[in-house]
Every structure is written in structure tokens, then in C-alpha cells.
Amino acid sequence: MVAREAAAVATPAEARAAGLDQEDLLLIYRHLLVTRGIEERGHILYRQGKIPGSFYTGRGNEAGAVGVGFAMGLDDVGCPIQRDMGVHIARGTEPWRIFAQYLGRVDGFARGRDGNVHMADFRLGLVAMVSHLPAMAPVAVGAALAFRLRNQPRVAVAWSGDGATSRGDWHEALNFAGVRQLPVVFVIDNNGFAYSTPNALEFPSGRLADRATGYGFEGVVVDGTDVLAVHREARRAIEKAREGGGPTLLEIVTLRMEGHAVHDDAFYVPKGLHEAWAKRDPIERYRAFLAEHVPGFAEERDDAIRLEVKQLLNEAVRRADESPLPDPATVLDGVYVDPAELDAPHHK
């Protein structure tokens, strides 16, 4: 194997070595709970007929998303996809605006004009996804090239699923980034299935991270149920890119614990596989780590954080439900631009 296998993080000392103090550890726990709670409430809203279209979640992928998002710098840019709610939360996205997006309201990020998971707060350095994955990988590479040309100490992060690695634009993005040694980190959410196609029928190599060497940079395989290991490896990769060390490919290995979307019952996933991965739930794993290593966590802090998150999300749903639906007369607002309104039209 070519890619490096990341070791687990087993002690607070290892977490401190990755730049995390006790309050960081508790904040990460809160982010994990908020991430899962938003998607669980989203399921309820969908069943109530309040969310148009289909609905996608990242259950089982919370640690991968939060771990990477928490490692990003304030001025870095990310292009998360539909399994990466935790990136939005770790970057500071307000939950009520996420629910407003789900409900197609004017306070959602797309203001009711786009799919319910096509969202991002650009002010937080996040770029909204499109469905044609991995179309956002070239976008992140473009951002990284801009950072290089402007001599800015910033890093771009691009996410994709395992299935998206079979597309040409994914290879083009990695090749260009490798040739130019750009400050970009590529994250693969390898959750076992590209819709219904298992890894064994997607690619012949044992690990997707092994491909990184062909593009001239490092590949790392990380257990996606270990939020602290994900954070450590993401932080290393991001800071390496910031210091001029070029790209890294992180393969975060999990299992998609629900179907591709709510319309998919995942009948093609062996029952035993779901049962085995359920025992490795990333939130329960992290809760056990905190109970062992953070004084007073199991006795009082765990309950206090969970109660706070429950109240936060209840209020977020209420506030989002009060947001109005968009006025149909504004449907084209912000969609098209008159070249005369541009400072420097591209055709001149």
C-alpha cells in the first residue's frame, strides 16, 4: 500500500499535541450533536411534507465532517457536499438558517431558489455544492490557485464521495493541483457505496488514497469514526498546504448508515454490515472518550450539553418556520446579471 494509515487518537495528550484543549474537545462534541440533531429533525420535517424534493443526510459521517471543518483556518475556503453537515456547523453556520434552507424559505441560503442541501454561508468561507459531483473539486482548485497568485496564506478544501472519484473532473482537479503543488486538501467521504454500488465494483485498488502518489502528493487513510484522528490529519494536511507543501488526499472511511436519500431504503447493504458499523457510532465513540478523560463529563457536562443542543434546535426549527416563503415575482432576482452592471464585463 502507498497511502499512510492514520493511527487512532487515544489520549488527551495526543489531542493536545494536535492543538486541542479541553474546551475544544467539548465544543467538538457539541458540533457532533448539533450535526446529527439537525438531520434527525430534517427527517421529521420531510415526513411532515414540509421539505420539498428529496432529503439527504450524513449519518455516520459526522466525525469526518466536524473533524475537518474544525481544523480549517478562519480564512480558508471549503466546498462541502451533502454528507458534510458537520463542516457547516464547525464553521459557525446558524442552525435556524439551515432549517430555513430545508423549508425553502427566504432566510435560507438559496432564498428558496435551489435544492434543500445546495447551501453554504459564503461569509464563512463555504461554497455551495451542486449535484454534479465532484464538480466542486475544480472550484476548490481554482480558489487554491487564486491564493497562490495573490500570495495569500490560505487553503482550499474539496470534498467528494467515493463514487465521484470515477469522474474525469475529479482526476483533472487532482492532476492540476499536483502539477502546481497548490494549497488544497482533497477529502473523500468513502462511505462504502456510490448510491448502490459497493467499493469493490467502483475501483480496483484497495484504497482510494493510494491514487495520490500518481498526482505527486501524499495520501492518508483515516478512520471516519474517530473525530480526533480526522482532526489531527486534516490539521496536518491543511497546515502543510499553507506552508507550501502542496496537496494531500484524505480518505475518510465510514459507512453510510442510511440510504442515498430518504427515497432509498438501502436494501442492497448487507444487514450485518450496518449492525457492525452501528457499534462504531462516531458520537458514541467520542462520548466514551470524553467520559474517560474529561473530569465531570459523564456526571453533569454531557447532560448539560445535550440539553443545550436540544433547546437550540427546537428554537431553530421554530424560527425557520416563521421565515416567509419567497415571493414568486422575485424568482429571477440574483439569477442573471446585466453585463452593463459589471465593472469590467468579461467580453471587453
Image (spheres, rainbow, N blue to C red):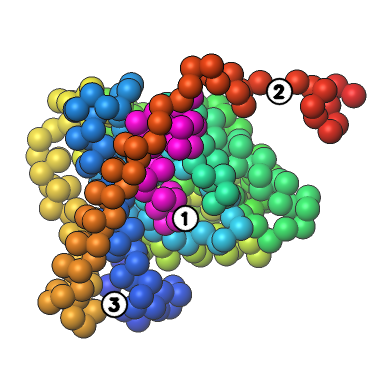
Residue 101, compared with residue 177, is above or below; it is above
Residue 23, compared with residue 233, is above or below; it is below
Q: Residue furthest top?
A: 329
Residue 324 seen in render:
yes
Side of 203 relative to 136 (left or right): left
Side of 255 relative to 154 (left or right): left
Residue wearing tag 1: 91
Q: Earlier in the sequence, mark 2 or mark 3?
A: 3
**Disc 2 to disc 3, C-alpha distance:** 54 Å
Determine whether the residue tagged by mark 2 lies in a helix, strand or loop: loop
Residue wearing tag 3: 11
On the image, the x and y values in percent for residue 65 come to 38, 51
On the image, the x and y values in percent for residue 83 come to 36, 40
* Disc 2 residue type (three-letter): Val
Q: Dot 2, how many residues are within 10 Å of its Cα: few (below 14), some (14-19), or many (20+)?
A: few
Q: Earlier in the sequence, mark 2 or mark 1?
A: 1
Which dot, 1 or 3, sits closer to the camera?
1
Residue 200, compared with residue 174, is above or below; it is above
Which dot, 2 or 1, sits closer to the camera?
2
Which dot, 2 or 3, sits closer to the camera?
2
Q: Residue furthest right?
A: 348
Residue 345: quarter of image: top right
- Segment colored magenta: 87-114
* Residue occupying the point 63% across, 42% down: 141
* Disc 3 residue type (three-letter): Thr
* Disc 1 residue type (three-letter): Arg
* Residue occupying the point 66% across, 65% down: 243
Determine whether the residue tagged by mark 3 lies in a helix, strand or loop: loop
**Disc 1 to disc 3, C-alpha distance:** 25 Å
Residue wearing tag 2: 337
